Image (cartoon, rainbow, N blue to C red):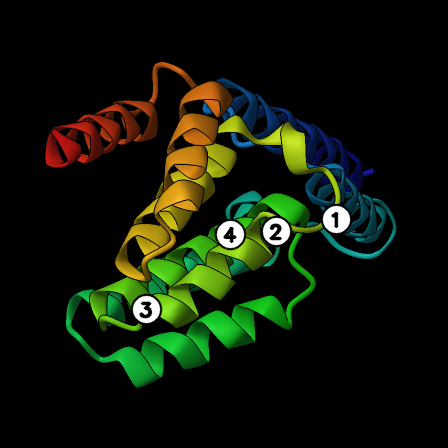
Amino acid sequence: MDSLPSGLIISLTGLLYIAGFEALFFIRQQGLSAQFAIEGLVITAASAAVAFTVLPINVALFLAALYLLTMRVRLLIDLGNWFTRRHSFQRAFAIYEFALLLYPDPASRRAVLINRGLAELTMQKSEMAYHTFKEALSGGELRRGALYLAASYYNLGIACRRTGRDLEAIQCFNEAKSAMPNSIYAYASERALKEDWAGKR
């Protein structure tokens, strides 16, 4: 009976964690993730089963493990970005590539590619960045994350502009505005379009 409260707490904690993060993804327009929910449910169910039948599990340790496992790709993105800011690009790219090997959900995969593309732009590797942002815009569930969609189109527009693809750049900036009209990417795209127009006058 001693393990029963622990099992119940583990179950409730896991469900609240999943619901909380999915709500956060929705509010931020990053796209809901079925994979995130399934992974969280599997980890929660396994942990609750152990807590019910074998031994109590510390809730703080369970929550930490749940966070590290379900957010593994996003944590690696943060680490890669940390190296990028310090211009340690080789390490950053190795981390981004490793993140892509950890079975990310579509939104996390797109986030990895966006950040890798930004690192490539920072290195003045605009052609590489162009193909990276193109890859970020490929695949299924494309319309489910307005924030990442707008970010992908805006940064692809920047890469297009730097590689002489002016017409495609204009199209990308307009797509970024349509994807998430009130976002920073929409405003940046509007400025970019005005700069293009001013440059042609």
Q: Nearer the viewer, mark 3 or mark 2?
A: 3
In the rendered image, which residue does mark 4 sit on? 64
Q: Nearer the viewer, mark 1 or mark 3?
A: 3
Q: Of the two numbered discs 2 and 4 on the same chain, state the one appearing first in sequence.
A: 4
- Other residues around mark 1 within 10 Å, as few (<14) / some (14–19) / many (≥20): some
| Residue 67 image offset from top left, x and y in percent | 54, 49
Q: Secondary structure at mark 1?
A: helix
Q: Quadrant of the C terminus?
A: top left
Residues under numbered marks 2 and 1 in contact, where contact means CB atoms less than 8 Å apart:
yes
Q: Is residue 33 left or right of residue 110?
A: right
Q: Amino acid at mark 1?
A: Glu
Mark pair 2, 4: CA separation: 10 Å
In the rendered image, which residue does mark 3 sit on? 120
Q: Which disc, if any, is residue 70?
A: 2
- Kindly identify the residue that appears in the image at 69 percent across and 63 percent down: 103
Mark pair 4, 1: CA separation: 14 Å
Q: Which disc, if any, is residue 39?
A: 1
Q: Nearer the viewer, mark 2 or mark 4?
A: 2
Q: Of the two numbered discs 1 and 3 on the same chain, state the one appearing first in sequence.
A: 1
Question: In the figure, residue 188 lies in which quadrant?
Answer: top left
Residues under numbered marks 3 and 2 in contact, where contact means CB atoms less than 8 Å apart:
no
Does residue 55 appear in the picture of this structure? Answer: yes
